[in-house]
Image (cartoon, rainbow, N blue to C red):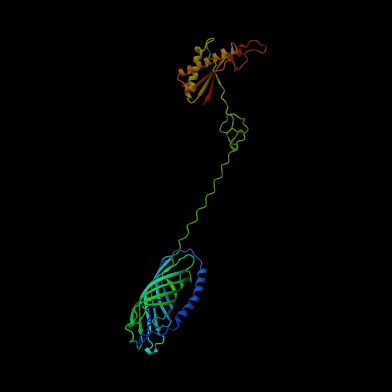
Amino acid sequence: MFHANYVPRQAFREDARPAEKQPIQGDETMKKTLAMLAPALLALSMSAGAQEEPFDDRFYVAPQVSWGFFDDQNDIELDDEFGYGVAIGKPITKWFNLEGYYFRFDDVGIEEAAALGDPEVTLEGYGLTGLFFPVPDAFRMFFLAGYAVGDYDVSGSNVQALNAVDEDADHIDVGLGYMHELNDYGLALRGEYRYRITDADNPRNIPGADLEDNYDNHVVSLYLQIPLGAKPVAPPPPPAPEPAPEPEPAPVAPVDTDGDGVPDNADQCPGTPAGTQVDAQGCPVKKAEPIILKGVNFEFNSAKLTSEATNRLDNVVNALSASEQIEVRIEGHTDSIGGASYNLKLSKERAASVRQYLIDRGIAADRLTSEGYGESQPIAANNKPNGADNPSGRAKNRRVELEVVNQ
């Protein structure tokens, strides 16, 4: 970055009378240069595409060349001159870079000073500059502001008119520029323009002379910005998520054509009628035949067991005691002699009498139920076909049965 230091603007004459103003050749040249530079900067800015990359905060070094345009002041005109320098900087954020720099202009000529031995001015200095990138992700155009301190040195064969030939100066810069990357590593060209105000004491101490201490300068520069170190690498993208597993197919309800609760592929007895109790193979459960307790008789017209009946029932007690998981229902039946309601009542009492006997002999009551059916479920004919009494049939119908209901 190029900072022209304080420039002596006063004619090297013994008298303090101001000379006539001459056309400012440096201003005209500067205006032409800016007119050519501005469209190029704008075109580069519009063509630069934004790229999403990791923030590059590497230090960089930037050697530069420049051209200085020095406005006349106090009737002194400096020639426009080539300069050089170097900057060292670092991006602080993607919007802001901070740089330290050194600049130098050698042998800046003073116009119309041949009589004074053609004195020349050497300008150099160092300072800090901030670069501001308003839209860092869109294009790399920037604004700048800086401050520098430095000195100038006047040399020649006849400079006694100056009270000092080595003067300190302060410089305030504002300007703009554009940065264009040349490759993926980050090597970049940077062009910029600076408007500089130089504040320094005028070296000529002439009583009564109206001499300015502030000087306007213009510097156009070109930098080659070289990053130091390896370029930051974006972290690898996170691995793609595992594909969602295929959903489990909906279970297919097994086909049960006959509706018995056993699927067809395991049903060994297809076509079972509705309501039929079946086993695990889908086959009808064979209903246990009722056990007819022969010889279990009661006294006439009574529910009291005979001694022979109790002997028979003792065998039942032994069987039930040996198979404690069995539950039974005790069913009482009569023949058709007598009224139907009386026979139903008598059959219930006799079934209950048998149940109570078994309970008294140690069979759990919750394993036994009793029911009477009267004359409604004969297993033989009570009368012969000709209507005559059938004693053998009636004897079969007067019975007590045990039916296993759970085992």
Q: Is residue 143 left or right of residue 200?
A: right
Q: Is residue 75 above or below residue 143?
A: below
Q: Residue at x 45, y 81 (%)?
A: 26
- Determine which quarter of the picture holds residue 217: bottom left
Q: Nearer the viewer, residue 243 or 388?
A: 243
Query: Is residue 141 in sight in this rendering?
Result: yes
x and y percentages locating residue 77 in the rendered image: 41, 83
Relative placement, left or right, of 173 versus 242 is: left
Report if residue 58 is visible in the image: no
Residue 243, image x and y in percent?
52, 52
Residue 398 vs residue 212: left or right?
right
Q: Nearer the viewer, residue 180 or 397?
A: 180
Q: Nearer the viewer, residue 405 or 159?
A: 159
Identify the image quadrant of the N terminus: bottom left
Residue at horizontal 49 percent and vertical 75 percent from the top: 37
Q: Quadrant of residue 72?
A: bottom left
Q: Nearer the viewer, residue 24 or 340?
A: 24
> How many labels sit on residues?
0
Vertical side of 149 occupied by 364: above or below: above
| Residue 363 percent across, percent down from the top left | 46, 21
Compared with residue 378, is residue 253 higher up or lower down, i.e. above or below? below
